[in-house]
């Protein structure tokens, strides 16, 4: 693990964002670890620090006008990325179980958009955001993530960059190991 990765994990641990126990992830999978990035968002100085490191990972060739983040997890991070890059910020939110643009947000034809998310395991909400952008006529140019729980296994058809790639074991509900099954499962929310 690099010094930078250790620093990032230290921020997650100190803010209570990296939790241990038995968790049911948004994907429905079970895990002994959970990233509750909202806990980092309690500390704006830490958010600024993490986003600064994330923005630095984006190649200069990635140009965008707007940042789109899925609510809730990506809101604070997406807004901070937009602030640090002097970009417009919009967000997608759930309506009838699907992410949609609301609040009269519009995407112009050909508008270049960066998707920002806090944590992915499979990347479903990122895929939904990419589809929204394309449906509205925009151009998704890249994805920026704080934590990629898939350790790089999640794939998108546009470039993606993560501050931290980490793979904690995840389990289907019917394949939970006994040591994890002995801990009551919680769904801490996203």
Image (spheres, rainbow, N blue to C red):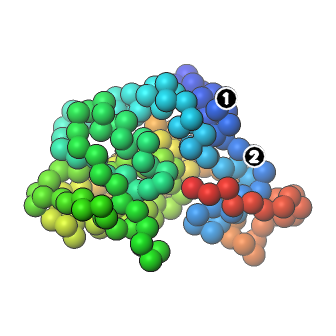
The residue under the point 14% across, 53% down is 111
Tell me the SS state at disc 1. Answer: helix
Residue 99 seen by the camera: yes
Q: Nearer the viewer, residue 27 or 38?
A: 38
- Looking at the image, how many numbered discs can be counted on the residues? 2
Location of residue 169 by image quarter:
bottom right
Q: Quadrant of the N terminus?
A: top right
Q: Position of residue 87 (x, y in %)?
A: 23, 39
Left or right of 147? Residue 11 is: right
Crowding at label 2, few (<14), some or many (≥20) Cα neighbours within 10 Å? Answer: few
Residue 17, percent across and down?
63, 40
Residue 20 numbered mark, or none: 2
Task: Give above or below for 126 relative to 48.
Answer: below
> At 37% across and 52% down in the image, what residue appears?
69
Q: Residue at x 60, y 40 (%)?
A: 39
Residue in the image at 75% along x and 46% along y:
20
Left or right side of 110 for 125: right
Alpha carbon of mark 1 to alpha carbon of mark 2: how far? 13 Å
In the rendered image, which residue does mark 1 sit on? Answer: 14
């Amino acid at each position: 693990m690099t010094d930078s990765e250790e620093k990032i994990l230290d921020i997650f641990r100190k803010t209570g964002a990296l939790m241990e126990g038995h968790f049911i992830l948004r994907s429905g999978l079970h895990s002994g670890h959970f990233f509750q990035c909202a806990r980092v968002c309690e500390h704006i100085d830490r958010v600024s620090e993490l986003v600064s490191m994330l923005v630095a990972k984006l190649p200069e060739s990635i140009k965008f006008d707007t940042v789109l983040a899925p609510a809730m997890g990506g809101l604070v991070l997406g807004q901070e990325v937009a602030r640090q890059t002097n970009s417009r910020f919009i967000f997608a939110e759930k309506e009838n179980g699907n992410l949609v643009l609301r609040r009269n947000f519009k995407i112009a034809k050909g508008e270049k958009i960066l998707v920002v998310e806090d944590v992915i395991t499979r990347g479903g909400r990122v895929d939904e955001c990419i589809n929204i952008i394309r449906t509205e006529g925009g151009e998704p140019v890249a994805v920026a993530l704080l934590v990629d729980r898939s350790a790089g296994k999640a794939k998108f058809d546009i470039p993606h960059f993560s501050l931290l790639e980490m793979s904690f074991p995840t389990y289907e509900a019917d394949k939970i190991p006994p040591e994890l099954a002995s801990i009551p499962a919680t769904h801490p929310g996203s």
